[in-house]
Image: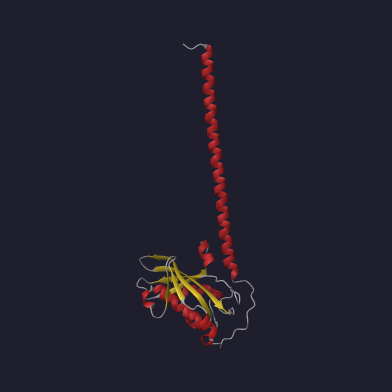
């Protein structure tokens, strides 16, 4: 049988254990709250970055550039510098391997890449009538100023195509193609979000919709790569 002194010691020991347990629980709760706060802050920063990317993409077309007068009768294929000094090859990449598509090996590539190769040719030739035909009826109804009523021949160079997403259902296939290029002596009639002598490129993504046998391909969406990567569209 325990005496009074031993009983008091045991009670103090139990009390100490209870206090330690309470302190540990409080510490864990505080740590959990701190981690939650940090994660919330990181999530907020990422959202703000995405919003900034969308803002950059949505306002890029509203920048005020001064362009030279458009010469609709100028034949860029008679421009010796463009034809002989610029890199006019169209590269195709999957992020690892890069090849060059041309009329000689055109059939080796997927129908989606072949389609976009044709779109590039329409842009270079200034064929705005043919260019506007690549879009779906739904896109045309909502496109507004995105449709090109008229543009000159475009001196595109350093071109690259990349399929960045592909999805297939029972009825259709969806394919997103990133298109990157620079424009020599840009006059703003096709891209008014690039300066006259812009050293960089502002890639765009063409969202393609195809029937399953790929005999019909149309563009159902067109947006800057920045906006596409943000996912906020």
Quarter residue 199 falls in: bottom right
| Residue at x 55%, y 31% (from the top left corner) | 23
Instruction: State whether residue 128 appears in this view.
Output: no
- Place of residue 224 in the rendered image (x, y in percent of width and height, measured from the top left): 53, 68
| Residue at x 52%, y 72% (from the top left corner) | 142
Q: Residue furthest front?
A: 85
Relative to 167, is 186 on the left or the right? Answer: right
- Place of residue 226 in the rendered image (x, y in percent of width and height, measured from the top left): 54, 65
| Residue at x 54%, y 30% (from the top left corner) | 22
Name above or below for residue 162 compared with residue 85: above
The one nearer the camera, 212 or 188, is 188
Name above or below for residue 162 compared with residue 41: below
The one nearer the camera, 81 or 229, is 81
The one nearer the camera, 78 or 133, is 78
- Place of residue 80 in the rendered image (x, y in percent of width and height, measured from the top left): 53, 86
- Place of residue 50 in the rendered image (x, y in percent of width and height, measured from the top left): 55, 60
């Amino acid at each position: 049988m325990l005496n009074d002194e031993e009983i008091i010691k045991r009670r103090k020991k139990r009390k100490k254990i209870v206090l330690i347990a309470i302190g540990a629980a409080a510490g864990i709760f505080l740590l959990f709250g701190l981690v939650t706060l940090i994660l919330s802050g990181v999530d907020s920063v990422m959202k703000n970055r995405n919003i900034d990317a969308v803002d950059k993409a949505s306002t890029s077309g509203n920048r005020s550039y001064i362009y030279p007068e458009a010469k609709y009768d100028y034949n860029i294929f008679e421009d010796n510098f463009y034809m002989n000094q610029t890199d006019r090859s169209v590269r195709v990449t999957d992020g690892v391997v890069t090849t060059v598509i041309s009329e000689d090996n055109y059939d080796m590539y997927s129908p989606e890449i072949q389609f976009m190769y044709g779109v590039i040719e329409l842009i270079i030739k200034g064929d705005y009538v043919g260019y506007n035909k690549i879009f779906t009826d739904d896109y045309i109804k909502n496109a507004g100023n995105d449709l090109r009523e008229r543009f000159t021949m475009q001196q595109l160079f350093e071109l690259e195509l990349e399929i960045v997403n592909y999805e297939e259902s029972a009825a259709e296939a969806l394919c997103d193609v990133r298109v990157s290029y620079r424009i020599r002596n840009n006059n703003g009639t096709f891209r008014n979000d690039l300066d006259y002598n812009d050293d960089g490129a502002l890639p765009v993504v063409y969202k393609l919709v195809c029937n399953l046998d790929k005999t019909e391909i149309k563009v159902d969406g067109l947006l800057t790569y920045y906006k596409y990567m943000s996912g906020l569209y």
